[in-house]
Image (cartoon, helix red, strand yellow):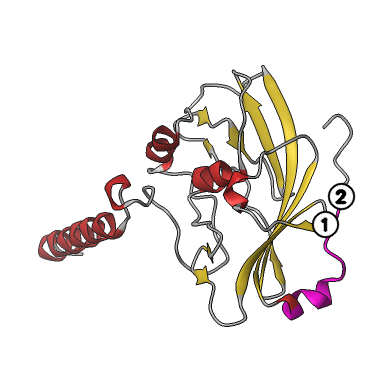
Amino acid sequence: MTGKRLALLAVVVAVFAVAADAAVPSIGSGVLPGTMIGKAPWGANDGRYLKQRLRAIGLHPLPAEGTKLHTHSHLYVVVNGRIYPIPALIGINVQQRFVAELHTHDISGIIHVESPTVRTFTLGEFFDVWGLRFTSRCLGGYCASGKKQVMVWVHGKRVTSDPRKIVLQPHLSIVVAYGTPASLKPLGPIPATYTFPPGY
């Protein structure tokens, strides 16, 4: 490749990088940096904006997992009747070597709460760490429209209050779904429990 073509390629890459940064919501917009508002599937979103989101919600980029509070909850995410795996390494930046109090290790759907202080953590905070839009009306790029809605269950019971305020307690079984109630029928009964590995 010639020098002129390399220079042109560098300019194009720089322009796209600036455009991408401009498209990312900022704290001032009321949306956390790097929030994903697109369609499923979603990645771990554990890169350049993770630290900014942690600071904005009062969590921390810890050098190691906390040990004062150590619990686990389980999360299913369902969109239009399809279960999407929860990505591994949500809340963990391997390159910069830090981990948030709320994180995942694998695609099991287990949310690890590992904090150096004893405090309450919520489902909304986990989605904020993930950087996936989650409100009573929207999940990522899916928002309530017609018969389609965001639906949440804890231990098999429908949550009618603000789902972001659900407290992550030991061995909680959570289902967050978008679609119509009929779209969930092929999945069978909403799971009321989850079998955690020994020691969890």
Relative horizontal placement of residue 61, taking residue 65 as reference (left or right) = left
Judged from the image, the secondary structure of the residue bearing numbered disc 1 is loop
**Residue at mark 1:** 156
Q: Do the residues labelled 2 and 1 touch (CB within 8 Å)?
A: yes
Q: Please say if 176 is above or below 128.
A: below
- Looking at this view, is 16 or 55 the one in front? 55
- Looking at this view, is 174 or 46 the one in front? 174
Q: Please say if 57 is above or below 144.
A: above
Position in image of residue 84 (x %, y %): 67, 63
- Measuring 50% from the left and 55% from the top, which residue is drawn there? 132
Q: Residues under labels 2 and 1: Cα distance?
A: 8 Å
Does label 2 or label 1 sit earlier along the sequence? 1
- Measuring 53% from the left and 57% from the top, which residue is drawn there? 135
Instruction: Give the extent of the magenta segment.
Output: 182-194
Q: Residue type at mark 1: give it.
A: Gly
**Residue at mark 2:** 193
- Measuring 86% from the left and 29% from the top, which residue is drawn there? 199
- Measuring 82% from the left and 71% from the top, which residue is drawn there? 187
Q: In which quarter of the image is residue 103?
A: top right
Relative horizontal placement of residue 96, taking residue 181 as reference (left or right) = left
Magenta-colored stretch includes residue 67: no
Position in image of residue 99 (x %, y %): 54, 31
- State which quarter of the image contains the C terminus: top right
Relative horizontal placement of residue 27, taking residue 174 as reference (left or right) = left
Of the two numbered discs 2 and 1 in the rendering, the one whose residue sits closer to the viewer: 1
Q: Please say if 61 is above or below 12.
A: above
- Looking at this view, is 195 or 133 the one in front? 133
Q: Residue type at mark 2: give it.
A: Thr
